[in-house]
Amino acid sequence: MRFENVGLRYGNGPEVLQDVTFALGPGSFHFLTGASGTGKTSLLSLLYLARRPSRGLIGIFGRDITAMKRDDLPPIRRRLGVVFQDFRLLDHLSALDNVALPLRVAGVSESDIQKHVPELLTWVGLADHINAKPPTLSGGQKQRVAIARAVINRPDVLVADEPTGNVDDRIAFRLLHLFAELNRLGTTVVIATHNETLVRRFRFPRLNLAGGGRLEVLPPLADVEEGAAEGGSPAAPGAMAGVGPVPPASLAARSDG
Ligand SMILES: Nc1ncnc2c1ncn2[C@@H]1O[C@H](COP(=O)(O)OP(=O)(O)OP(=O)(O)O)[C@@H](O)[C@H]1O
Ligand SMILES: [Mg+2]
């Protein structure tokens, strides 16, 4: 997946993204950082194909999406898991049915759905809310339903916009472990966040929107800080391993093909 000299403007306004160039290797994990209003959601909306750039090239799964017709996009979209900043759950469906949607679209059997979806919802702390409808859930609970829906089908790429913005740090760490596990299974992950504790704790590189629509690619925050403290010693590998329980086996249950 790559961006080359991508620019984005809304209507006749100024460019909110300017000359954005980066590549995401398959199976990579990046944080997307930057102050409020610097363009994180705008950049992610290009990644999950909700918008097209005003200029530049976006390659995804080896294809230039800026040259593709609208009708060619849905099969690509189905390979993406998205956690929207505003969740976008279906209010008339239960938590279980919201999370089951991508599995039903993919033709997964109802018995597998009834097994794996409650398992994942339980893992994210929603065992008591499996049959609840979104309007009866708190912000943090809705956020976890949205996350479960995005990861249940083990997408090739996960794009998450502030996925821990409504939960406490304990749950946030648990959710980051879920994303890291998904990444270990092969999913390319991009997570927009303001949470510096998370960014410090999980040693992943950063895409940082520095203002003026410019993007810089930065090494993991902890590496930079330790480098400053110790004169540039490399980071210990696996520094984030072994914290918290392993996510449920249901993540590995994707029916490939
Ligand atoms: N639909 C839109 N129409 C016009 N301008 C928009 C639109 N969406 C975003 N913008 C503008 O683009 C800029 C970047 O917004 P964006 O939502 O991408 O920022 P963000 O980094 O995600 O912020 P936050 O951290 O608050 O979520 C802002 O100046 C915003 O006003
Ligand atoms: Mg945003």
Image (spheres, grey):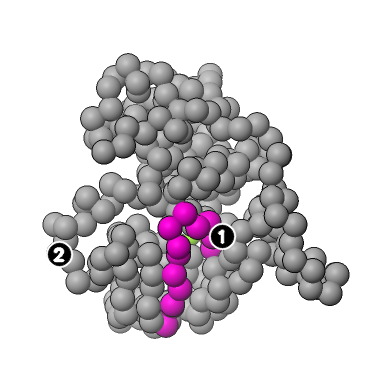
- SS at badge 1: strand
Q: Quadrant of residue 103?
A: top left
Q: Main secondary structure of the magenta part?
A: strand
Q: Which residue is mark 1?
A: 31
Of residue 245 and residue 128, the one placed in the foreground of this image is 245
Quarter of the figure that contains the N terminus: bottom left
- SS at badge 2: loop
Q: Which residue is mark 2?
A: 69
- Residue 146, given in percent of the width and then of the height, sits at 44, 39
**At 40% from the left edge and 40% from the top edge, which residue is drawn?**
154
- Residue 211, given in percent of the width and then of the height, sits at 55, 78
The amino acid beneath tag 1 is Phe
Q: Quadrant of residue 22?
A: bottom left
Quarter of the figure that contains the C terminus: top left
In this picture, residue 66 sits left or right of residue 71:
right
**At 28% from the left edge and 47% from the top edge, which residue is drawn?**
78
